Amino acid sequence: MIARISLEDKVAIITGASRGIGESIARTFVASGARVVIAARKLDGLRAVAESLGDQAHAVAAHTGREADCEALVAAAIERYGRVDVLVNNAATNPYFGPMLDVDMGAWQKTFEVNLQGYFWMARGVARHLRERGAPGAIVSVSSVAGLEAAPMQGVYGMTKAAVISMTRTLAYELASSGIRVNALCPGLVETRLAAAITSNDTLVEEVMRKTPLGRVGQPEEIAGAALFLASDAARYMTGQAMVVDGGMTMC
């Protein structure tokens, strides 16, 4: 059997897809044959992405920091396309950049709601749907290298991303007998609005580049390629893993 990196005839939900990594994943998935339901808090930018992708994409406004929105998003995808085969948890927030001891509890709570609770609610909804269908599937959660090592000035964000990796491994174990694979992606520094606190600061970029063998900031489409692999049948023997895509930074 030849492994194919394809999502032909698959239906995927992608959260945080109005820009950046999520948008790039949506475009890559559609180009690989999938129909996608893309979600973000606001419909404005999301609709433009969906329209540019044609009939293969459907936009749904959803705040994944709210359990009811997550449930409604899964239901909307099933109503639109009849089923869900793949989930990409990508929606994230990082409202606080500074020492952990000074974090405001409002920013703390918001970070955990979106980056961790939302990921769990979405994974639970899709996994239950797949089990009811008796169908295999794939869940890919975008974590971060900040979840693998110390994350100075991004401590709360890093905590949520470490928890995503732990959740990924446990769900992978518990869902394996149902044919549902669960993996995480750990990007390094990527050119997105979320990373603007670093990418807009020459001193911080220089420090990161000093530790990055490839010597440059990553681009969203480079993360999308890894997400495509994990979602496809080419990765059918891979589960419970945290795939690092960071230009070599964490190996140094």
Image: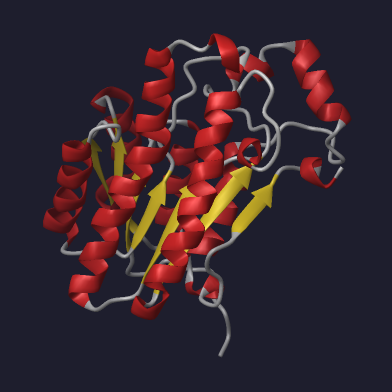
Q: Could you say which is closer to the camera, residue 84 or residue 44? A: 84
Q: Quadrant of the N terminus?
A: bottom right
| Viewer-proximal residue among 214 and 164 | 164
Residue 144 falls in image quadrant: top right
Residue at 67% of width from left, 28% of height from top?
151
Q: Position of residue 234 (x, y in %)?
A: 55, 73
Where does the C terminus fall, quadrant-wise? top right
Relative side of 23 to 151, left or right: left
Q: Quadrant of residue 97?
A: top right
249 lies left or right of 147: right
- Residue 123 position, x and y percent, is 33, 54
The reply to whether residue 100 is visible in this rendering is yes
Q: Vertically, is 25 above or below 42?
A: below
Q: Position of residue 246 (x, y in %)?
A: 72, 43
Q: Residue at x 19, y 37 (%)?
A: 69
Q: As rendered, which of 92 and 25 lies closer to the eye?
A: 92
